[in-house]
Image (tube, rainbow, N blue to C red):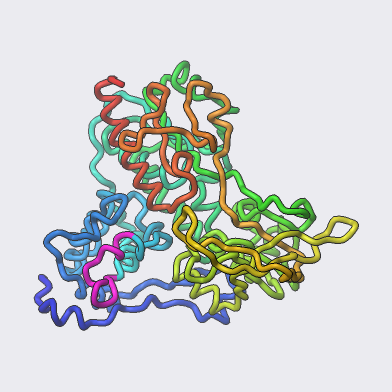
């Protein structure tokens, strides 16, 4: 069924909101916050699409999902066809439908956003992925005949999984090596259950496994095996390094070694991989947040995940501290909205200068100063400047530092001919993702620094294209 509603009328149709759990109930629950569209909502929202001749939504998507095509299939009622269309470009649709910052990418390019709310592309994608999974008829893309070429992928995060999906479709033998005991990288250790259920990640990985991708956990490349060994005695024709940027950064202020101070990486990894979110079924592997005052430093999505997780662990108060204003916060607007609804306290224009504790080494508070915004700095945002004489202490038994991440040095340190920059990120050609080492490609956060899931997936697709060209011709 074609969409016969005139564009002028479609522009008047309101964007369908995402159903979600009530804030009071979800603030202490790890159940997923967003509930997803039903059949009525997805039909109404799909009809809003203007079916542009040159869809800017697709050009704005780092993996190039053909939005107009899959929306046309939704309007026609062919939901499994829509799922197959998405999977042509996106190996992880149930994941990106939940955590991708669509407002800055596909939806940001939607022509409707110039005069009304953009098409809810992420919500539609999530519905289609969930519908396909519930139907039990997950479509496996066509796999080319075996080429005899072997490709190793280091890391099972979004970049590695995206590359694996594209390469296995080309007929190559693909094996993904993961250092941890669970697959998914940042998708499982970094994003909490209430935003991205672990079962969703597992099911998308199961599709890749059904396509022929091989997985091996508990393999620390750089320690268990080196890149040279993979390309030597292990016989791999190419390697894609997609290890992410998981080295936590701290504030370099006094008191950060006090008991009760965490990096966001450690805090979220313990919650997610060690099942603290299922206490008391699992022993809680974090310093108990129950009835404690918790302070989180930062303003990105990781900070939001941390502060909202602390609330769900039973914190008496959960305060977000950020040295700039709310307008400068890099977190998704939806995450900020949800955090406020759930009771998170926002302390903007506030900067920690010391972690305060007892003589026995336990955190009791975070000493802060007020900030004011000056002229823009190199990031384009107004530079925060301390206000003299404004020091004060926020009571806290737990503090979580979400101030960014750096490159884990293990692969680089055991591969001397692999070029890195001054921050120890791997240097790779921005188009081909080739590194200084023949047969080795790198992409995602280990090249760019911390970014989004979908940008990492885009890098994975770009790497897969280059790897396919290389192993087909064996010219470097």
Q: Can residue 287 be seen by looking at this rendering? A: yes
Q: Nearer the viewer, residue 219 or 380?
A: 380
Q: Nearer the viewer, residue 389 or 194?
A: 389
Residue 304 drawn above or below residue 229:
below
Magenta span covers which residues? 105-119
Res 134 → quadrant = bottom left
Q: 401 left or right of 379?
A: right
Question: Most extreme residue toward the top, as rendered?
Answer: 233
- Residue depicted at x 29% and y 61%: 106
- Residue depicted at x 62% and y 48%: 249
Reply yes or no: does residue 109 show up in magenta. Answer: yes
Q: Position of residue 410 (x, y in %)?
A: 58, 32
Residue 345 drawn above or below residue 410:
below
Res 441 → quadrant = top left
Q: Nearer the viewer, residue 93 or 248?
A: 248
Reply yes or no: does residue 288 show up in magenta. Answer: no
Q: Position of residue 272 (x, y in %)?
A: 59, 56
The quadrant of the picture occupied by the N terminus is: bottom left
The quadrant of the picture occupied by the C terminus is: top left
- Residue depicted at x 26% and y 46%: 141
Q: Position of residue 177 (x, y in %)?
A: 49, 35
- Residue depicted at x 53% and y 29%: 412
Q: 261 left or right of 102?
A: right
């Amino acid at each position: 069924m074609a969409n016969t509603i005139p564009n002028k009328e479609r522009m008047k149709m309101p964007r369908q909101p995402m159903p979600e759990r009530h804030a009071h109930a979800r603030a202490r629950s790890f159940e997923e916050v967003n509930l997803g569209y039903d059949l009525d909502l997805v039909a109404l929202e799909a009809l809003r699409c203007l079916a542009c001749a040159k869809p800017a939504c697709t050009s704005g998507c780092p993996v190039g999902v053909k939005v107009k095509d899959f929306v046309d299939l939704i309007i026609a009622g062919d939901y499994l066809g829509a799922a197959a269309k998405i999977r042509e470009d996106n190996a992880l649709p149930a994941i990106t439908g939940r955590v991708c910052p669509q407002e800055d990418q596909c939806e940001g390019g939607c022509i409707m956003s110039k005069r009304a709310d953009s098409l809810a592309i992420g919500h539609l994608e999530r519905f289609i992925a969930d519908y396909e999974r519930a139907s039990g008829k997950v479509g496996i893309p066509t796999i080319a005949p075996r080429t005899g070429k072997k490709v190793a992928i280091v890391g099972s995060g979004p970049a590695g999984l995206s590359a694996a999906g594209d390469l296995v479709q080309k007929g190559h033998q693909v094996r993904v090596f993961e250092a941890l005991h669970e697959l998914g990288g940042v998708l499982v250790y970094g994003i909490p259950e209430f935003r991205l259920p672990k079962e969703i990640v597992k099911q998308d990985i199961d599709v890749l496994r059904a396509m022929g991708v091989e997985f091996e956990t508990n393999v620390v490349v750089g320690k268990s095996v080196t890149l040279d060994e993979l390309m030597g005695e292990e016989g791999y024709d190419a390697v894609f390094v997609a290890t992410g940027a998981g080295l936590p950064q701290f504030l370099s202020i006094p008191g950060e070694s006090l008991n009760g101070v965490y990096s966001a990486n450690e805090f979220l990894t313990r919650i997610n991989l060690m099942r603290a979110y299922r206490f008391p079924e699992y022993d809680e592997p974090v310093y108990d947040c129950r009835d404690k005052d918790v302070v989180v430093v930062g303003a990105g999505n990781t900070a939001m995940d941390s502060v909202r997780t602390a609330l769900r662990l039973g914190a008496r108060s959960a305060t977000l501290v950020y040295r700039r204003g709310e307008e400068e916060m890099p977190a998704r607007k939806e995450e900020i909205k949800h955090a406020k609804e759930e009771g998170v306290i926002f302390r903007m224009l506030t900067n920690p200068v010391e972690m305060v504790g007892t003589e026995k080494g336990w955190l009791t508070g975070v000493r802060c100063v007020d900030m004011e915004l000056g002229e823009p700095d190199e990031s384009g945002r107004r530079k925060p400047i301390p206000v003299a004489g404004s020091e004060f202490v926020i009571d806290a038994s737990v503090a979580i530092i979400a101030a960014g991440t750096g490159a884990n040095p293990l692969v680089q340190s055991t591969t001397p001919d692999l070029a890195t920059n001054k921050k120890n990120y791997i240097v790779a050609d921005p188009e081909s993702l080739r590194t200084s080492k023949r047969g080795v490609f790198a992409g995602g956060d280990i090249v760019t620094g911390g970014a989004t899931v979908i940008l990492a997936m885009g890098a994975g697709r770009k790497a897969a294209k280059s790897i396919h060209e290389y192993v087909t011709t064996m010219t470097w």
